Image (tube, rainbow, N blue to C red):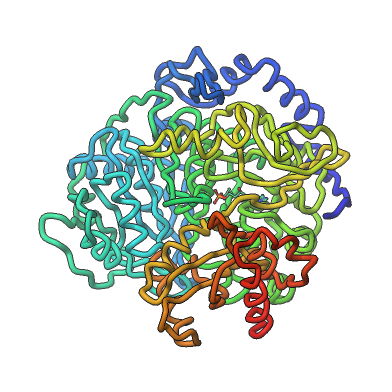
Amino acid sequence: MSDDLFPVPADWAASARIDKAARAADYQRSLEDADAYWLEQARRLDWNTPPTRASESSFDEADFTIRWFADGTLNASVNCLDRHLAERGDAVAILWEPDDPDETPRQLTYRQLHAEVCRFANVLKGAGARRGDRITIYLPMIPEAAVALLACARIGAIHSVVFGGFSPEALAGRIIDCDSTIVVTADEGRRGGRRVPLKANVDTALALDHCSSVHHVLVVRATGGTVPMQNGRDIWYDEAMAQASADCPAEIMNAEDPLFLLYTSGSTGKPKGVVHSTGGYLLWASLTHQLCFDYRPGDVWWCAADVGWVTGHSYIVYGPLANGATTLMYEGLPNWPTHSRIWEIVDRHQVHTLFTAPTVLRALMKEGDAFVHVTSRASLRLLGSVGEPINPEAWRWYHHVVGEDRCPIIDTWWQTETGGAMIAPMPGATDLKPGSATFPMPGVEAMIVDGEGRPIEGEGEGNLVIARSWPGQMRTVWNDHDRFFQTYFTTFPGKYTTGDGARRDADGYYWITGRVDDVINVSGHRMGTAEVESALVLHSAVAEAAVVGMPHEIKGQGIYAYVTLNAGEVPGEELRRALIQWVRAEIGPIATPDVIQFAPGLPKTRSGKIMRRILRKIAEGEVSPQALGDTSTLADPSVVDDLVRSRLAFA
Ligand code: PRX
């Protein structure tokens, strides 16, 4: 951790809408006069019926409720599109940069995007979509992804975006869980010059057992690659759009109606469908985008995430478009065809704010500064970070080499569950410390508690919890409200458990220390160790598997799997490779194990519980008896010696 302070730069201090005193006063008011504060904030949205009530929420078991603006009605697509038409209809809404730098970028004005969204909303209706239906979106990073999201919002259908890097198996699981009736996909995606067979993956997914709810697949022609179309089920996007009217009245939704669901990994079980609301979520995405990044009309905003993750939902689509911003969408990879690509895009489109992940910075930093220096980056004023703790070294590089000491670094801590940034700096209001996400946003009553739930005041370290509801909070787990309560509100009763650890320093700055549960963060992507374990044990050679995170220079954390084989199976390189391939096919390339260690047995307590603490230490290469701690409660302590021996053998 670093205690250096980077004060608010003079230009930001002079121009920003919120200074230090305003931030502090705003925060206090948001907690002390919450109803009035939030009803006032709600006015940043256009409502059909403005709400008269703010939060009606309780985290207690007896009256567990999360509800915001419950008597308000609105439509999210109207807020992102229609209301901007009069003032900035011809301003660019989406600026699209293709994978191949020699291709021409595309742009869609608010008026054009509005027309496309209305057309596609009519196409969806024509395909049978109704308010409340679930629609799965499995698209590459092309403007049609934003069109699809907003078209669902327009007709009140609930979108469920599945990241294009997930396998057919993973896609099928997500379709089945929410009974999706329509899938929107493309012939193929493109990333770093390679093709991703999206439509073929959909076909494979829909042919799997139990994946029978889908009656239509809408296919965007993105690459022109040949794909088989199933008669009666599959529809070409462009053909349907050509027939569709650009007039589509928006469905009036209640603030609490679900806007979307998005699957995310937890410490146990299958990924859960995180449900976000229409009013509270949209307000949170829009407000945090404004507060953290002080967006001004005309600025080019670039969130370099994928729309398959919550960051893409909140900060490529909903937040920026609700704020009338020009949002850049990039199809490809940050380091292709060269390690300068990301900075070339900044120059090409005169990007004002870049929002990316530490893993990207670490990977580029390793390649040397020359790739940055060949570009100008003079348009940059602000830099953002998200997805995992940013190590001070990467922070400094981002600040000094990329931003030439002129751009504040906005390190935003949040989660799929929180809808938008929860702890983050504001450029005109917050002195920065490299590696700290700084202070809570308005309304976010962050607390640090010890293992028994006792609050730690002042300086200290423990579990990060949130003591009251905020508008962008997830409302439930799709189809499993009990799981929602059990997962987030029982560890520390009456509080939302984030699953993260944090330290508060003497100046009140928060430092996120990482997950305290069995979730690992690989390149800013969340992975449940249980998911990788379930995939491994499906392989016929595997008897048992235990997965833990390990430190990784670029990815932040890597995936370390201990595998016990069935009798008669021979451990070796060939099987190792086969298992890695297996996991990639079951979940997707993001779940590729970095290390597989064959283990004759796993360290278990007498009641059969795997002691992950020991496995984590061995994965980290810490194998001394002091590091491993007490092993006397294990059913068979000699298992640990075997693990250490084989770890040392291949280290
Ligand atoms: O551990 C925290 C880490 O990412 C987790 C949430 O992952 P996900 O739901 O996929 O959302 C990622 C995009 C918000 C958190 O529990 N995390 C996210 N941002 C930060 C972070 N850890 C430290 N600093 C951050 N800025």
Quadrant of residue 425 in the image? top right
Seen as rendered, the residue at the extreme left is 231
Judge from the rendering whether residue 465 lies leftward or rightward of residue 171; answer left or right. right
Q: Residue at x 56, y 76 (%)?
A: 597
Q: Is residue 352 visible?
A: no
Residue 199's spot in the image, x, y percent? Answer: 28, 64
Quadrant of residue 138 in the image? bottom left
Q: Residue at x 65, y 72 (%)?
A: 638
Residue 118 drawn above or below residue 57: below
Count of numbered circles on the image: 0
Q: Is residue 619 visible?
A: yes
Q: Residue at x 41, y 69 (%)?
A: 190
Q: Which is nearer the eye, 273 or 597?
A: 597
Q: Which is nearer the eye, 155 or 442?
A: 442
Q: Quadrant of the N terminus?
A: bottom right
Q: Residue at x 27, y 46 (%)?
A: 180
Q: Which is nearer the eye, 125 or 342?
A: 125
Residue 577 drawn above or below residue 591: below
Residue 470 drawn above or below residue 521: above
Judge from the rendering whether residue 217 lies leftward or rightward of residue 231; answer left or right. right
Judge from the rendering whether residue 601 lies leftward or rightward of residue 393; answer left or right. left
Judge from the rendering whether residue 44 lies leftward or rightward of residue 565; answer left or right. right
Residue 583's spot in the image, x, y percent? Answer: 43, 70
Quadrant of residue 43 in the image? top right
Residue 520's spot in the image, x, y percent? Answer: 58, 58
Residue 96's spot in the image, x, y percent? Answer: 46, 57
Q: Which is nearer the eye, 546 or 238?
A: 546
